[in-house]
């Protein structure tokens, strides 16, 4: 993680982020006018973010831009210093991660957070059962998702022996097993080969229709982001630089300068 960036005290006209309002607040997971300060330093300053139910939103930006902090705010892991979070019209700003998870906001983590001694299938099953369905239904649901994500043949393997890239898939499977309304994926393609990236791209593209949920995707791999996202929002030093379609983002001079220029081939 990079050091927190001091935006506090700078000219508001300079630090103001553009509004990203594109959805009806009743039908999205959104953070509005979000600030997050750590020890007086702004990690996020006046950022709006919205993901719709049938949408894949990409959140990109250099290391330390504030992407994970923003996802932490949307999932209840980080209370915002200022601003509100809405889930399909309901103010959920003060809700715990557990409450949000039970209400349909699921996420993955950069580090797997799997039960390493437990078989892959049970890792996914537990996530489903925690949402209140029976063990048998949870198992069937888990196996369906593992089949879809290409891990059915490893269902009985302890999660701890999986290669890193498979761990990330199990993380996605666990999040989807919760039957979320929104799923937030933190760098799902990290460490993947080009071939694996292609596979994960196709899977992510299927999520809104197959699972009926919106996707917020943090990802450094631009091929993946530009290949699957309907909209892309760009953060840098804690504020939104711009947002738009992948095509618009690729052509944005500030984006090219601040981010894509150095990592477009990541
Ligand atoms: N718990 C914390 N305490 C203090 N500072 C933090 C904390 N979490 C994040 N930060 C700071 O907030 C800023 C944003 O960090 P964040 O991890 O959200 O960025 P990011 O865009 O997700 O970066 P990366 O791509 O490297 O994951 C950074 O300057 C980081 O050092």
Image: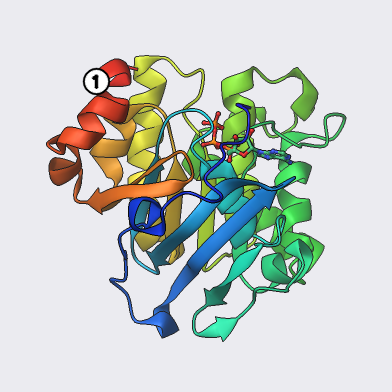
Identify whether 221 is placed above or below 128.
above
Where residue 157 appears, as percent x and y from the top left, is: 75, 26
Residue 122 picture location, percent across and down: 78, 44
> Image quadrant of ligand 1?
top right
Judge whether residue 189 can be spotted in this image: yes
Residue 126 vs residue 229, the one in the foreground = 229
Give the class, few, some or many, for how many residues have Cα within 10 Å of label 1's Cα (few <14, many ≥20).
few
Residue sitting at x 72%, y 41%: 121
Residue 141 placement: quadrant: bottom right
The C terminus lies in which quarter of the figure?
top left
* Residue 190 vertical position relative to residue 212 in the rendered view, above or below: above
Placement of the N terminus among the 4 image quadrants: top right
Where 66 falls versus 138 (above or below)?
A: above
Tell me: 48 left or right of 259: right
| Disc 1: residue Cβ within 8 A of ligand 1's nearest atom | no
Q: Circle 1 sits on which residue? A: 261
**Vertical side of 260 occupied by 25: above or below:** below
Circle 1: element type: helix
Position in image of residue 4 (x %, y %): 62, 35
Question: Is 113 or 7 nearer to us in this picture?
Answer: 7
120 lies left or right of 190: right
208 to the left or right of 167: left
């Amino acid at each position: 993680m990079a050091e927190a960036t001091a935006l506090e005290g700078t000219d508001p006209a300079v630090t103001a982020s553009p509004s990203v309002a594109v959805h009806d607040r009743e039908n999205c997971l959104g953070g509005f006018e979000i600030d997050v300060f750590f020890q007086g330093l702004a990690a996020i300053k006046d950022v709006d973010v919205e993901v719709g139910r049938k949408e894949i939103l990409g959140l990109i930006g250099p290391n330390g831009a504030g992407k994970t902090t923003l996802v932490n705010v949307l999932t209840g892991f980080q209370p915002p210093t200022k601003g509100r979070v809405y889930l399909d019209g309901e103010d959920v700003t003060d809700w715990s991660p557990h409450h949000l998870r039970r209400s349909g906001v699921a996420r993955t983590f950069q580090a797997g957070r799997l039960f390493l001694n437990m078989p892959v299938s049970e890792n996914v099953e537990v996530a489903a059962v925690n949402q209140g369905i029976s063990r048998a239904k949870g198992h069937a649901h888990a196996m369906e998702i593992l089949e879809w994500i290409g891990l059915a043949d490893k269902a009985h393997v302890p999660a701890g022996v999986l290669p890193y890239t498979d761990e990330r898939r199990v993380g996605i499977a666990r999040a989807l097993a919760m039957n979320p309304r929104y799923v937030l994926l933190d760098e799902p393609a990290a460490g993947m080969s080009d071939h694996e990236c292609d596979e994960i791209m196709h899977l992510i593209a299927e999520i809104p229709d197959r699972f009926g949920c919106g996707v917020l995707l943090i990802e450094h791999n631009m091929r993946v982001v530009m290949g699957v996202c309907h909209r892309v929002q760009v953060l840098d030093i804690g504020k939104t630089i711009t947002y738009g379609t992948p095509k618009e983002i690729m052509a944005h001079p500030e984006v090219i300068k601040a981010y894509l220029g150095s990592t477009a081939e990541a």
